[in-house]
Amino acid sequence: MINQKVYIILTDTGTLFTRCIKLFTRKPHNHASISLDANLGQVYSFGRKKPNNPFIGGFIKEDIHHDFYRKSKCVIYSITVTEEQYEKIMEKIKKMEEDKRHYRYNLIGLLFILFRIPYNRKNAYFCSQFVASILNESGVIYFEKPLSLMTPYDLLDDYKMQRIYEGNLQGYPISMSNIVA
């Protein structure tokens, strides 16, 4: 059986919304995404659909080269998965992408995290809840914490992830090509 890798990306875009979240989390990165490839050409999350409006959100495919991420800081981890788990991740993401109009950003769920109260809404996720759900439903990681309470750094706790990069998100592809070359 051939193993694959998926990538967990934690970012700090520096927006007002992320600065507000940072006041609560006290962590340097407060947005989580998942990528199916090392070049980050297929990056998925739940977040803002319009860069200047954090209140209109849902399932998104992120373009790390977009101006919105120009000054973003990040930390990127890889985790080894089986071929079967990788296929399940791809299937789940493909289905969500096809039905993305049915998915919403779980802004209310963020408020419930403040009070440590699990709160699930049908077809609604915030970024780390989405990544945790994908990893959980594909059998990669079974989290003990309720998925609706997951923060970006909870994704990393005690799991066999390798940190492969930390720095400016725009610098990542350049540094990866240097490592591969």
Image: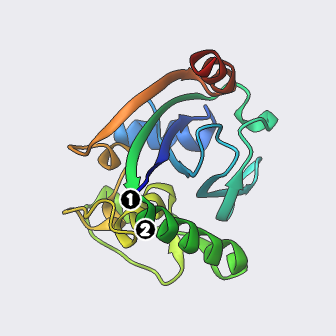
Q: Which label lies toward us, 1 or 2?
A: 1
Horizontal side of 4 relative to 181 (left or right) equals left
Give the position of the C terminus as an image quadrant: top right
| Coloring scheme used | rainbow
Residue found 62% across the figure and 18% down from its top: 175
Q: Quadrant of residue 143?
A: bottom left
Query: How many marks are shown on the rendered structure?
Result: 2
Which residue occupies the foreground of this view, 125 or 87? 87
- For label 2, count other residues whose C-alpha is less than 10 Å away and answer few (under 14), some (14-19) or many (20+): some
Report whether 104 appears left or right of 136. right
Q: Is residue 92 left or right of residue 65?
A: left
* Three-letter residue code for mark 2: Glu
Name the residue beneath numbered marker 1: 1
**Residue 177 image point, x, y percent:** 66, 22
**Residue 130 vertical position relative to residue 66 in the rendered view, above or below:** below
Residue that numbered label 2 is attached to: 84
Q: Is residue 148 above or below residue 121?
A: above
